[in-house]
Image (cartoon, rainbow, N blue to C red):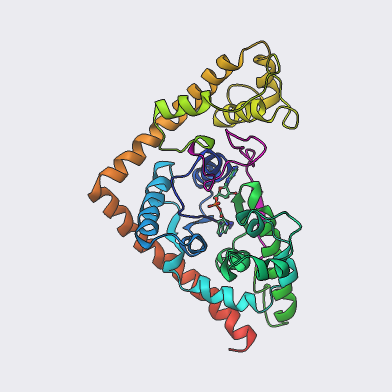
Amino acid sequence: GNIIFSGIQPTGVPHLGNYLGALRPWVKLQNEAEENTMLFYSIVDLHALTGQQPPEILMQMRTEMMAALYAVGLQHRRSTIFCQSSVPQHAELMWILSCSASMGQLSRMTQWKSKLALPDDASPFDTVANKPGLRLGLFSYPVLQAADILLYRATHVPVGEDQAQHLEFARGLAASFNHAYQHPGLASPPLVPPQTILSPAKRVMSLTDPTKKMSKSDADPKSRILISDSTADINRKINAAVTDSIEGITYDREARPGVSNLIDIMYYMDDSVASSPQDLATDFKDMSKRALKAKVADTIETHIAPIRHRYQTLIENEPQTKTLLRRSIDHTRVARRRALRTVTEVKSLIGI
Ligand code: TYM
């Protein structure tokens, strides 16, 4: 059967980019999964340590993320939902993989550069000397991500476009490990190079600067809509969204990024409204931007309202949250068992 794995950092309530790019596809995979498909969804708190938050904030964000995952429709009955840090094998496999991961390849990863606001062609070797902000964990982050995936022998990983480069890296690590340690006695290669499943809404853009992706770390809260936002928040943020001064509505992500992002958001929230973003734009061609924004805000509200409601109930209802956390402990056992099996095999292959 297929094994689905994906992760999200507990760095705040998910925004529409996380939702459309990842969480909604996760729920869809869960709901359409065949009997023999296994699904693992992890709150990757070890990755979040690269953000160096105060401990009580990190603790709270893990709980909020757990509530958010249920609110969007993940279910313990079908998916294994757990915190990365409660399965020690993530860190263990990471070290083993670190010993074969290429520094050169890691230096080409764009995420640590964007976190430090460096150009895409920045070299880590200049950066180490000049930027104390380049910590080892931020640089080796993709190795931990590869360990997450390879530990469960995931066949498919649903993510947004910003993670595609990391998944390519994970496939490369798996292939080189298999090449180095494959031997004739093994029925199958020790590690499984995973396939990327890119969401159709693979890159939702910022509402305040539609040339950048919507991001949790943007200083301006108006740049993103959270799945817990109120009706008024949604209206206010969509009304303030940056567009352009061109008459009418057309779809062109290059020339009209703001308008196209709003069209995309509306289409991907509810793809029953048209057969493509382009078609939706054609339907709206004579509309004013104000009217377009009202429609977009309305569509978001319709789809977010039940999620917001479930999220608030979980956050405010302490016993219910406790039950969730308890169930997640059971799930941790399931995850650990599978992770331990992979690490035991890997260790025996490498001679320890
Ligand atoms: P994170 O926590 O930044 O984001 C979680 C998921 O949301 C997607 N996403 C977006 N999709 C479309 N448009 C956007 N603007 C947008 N912003 C975020 C991300 O692509 C991601 O799928 N390194 C990962 C977490 C991780 C992981 C893993 C993922 C750790 N280990 C193993 C997959 C497999 C991250 O920081 O995601």
- Asked if 219 appears above or below 8 in the picture, the reply is above
Whole-percent x and y of residue 269?
54, 31
Residue 211 position by quadrant: top right
Span of residues in magenta = 192-221
| Residue 130 on the magenta segment | no
Drawn side of residue 45 relative to residue 59, left or right: right
Q: Residue furthest top?
A: 286
Residue found 32% across the figure and 53% down from its top: 324
Membership of 219 in magenta stretch: yes
Please indicate, yes or no, whether residue 175 appears anywhere in the rendered image.
Answer: no
In the figure, is residue 316 to the left or right of 190? left
Q: Quadrant of the C terminus?
A: bottom right
The quarter of the image holding the N terminus is bottom right
**Above/below status of 301 relative to 154:** above
Q: What residue sits 52% from the left and 63% below the top?
A: 50
**Residue 346 placement (x, y as % from top left):** 60, 79
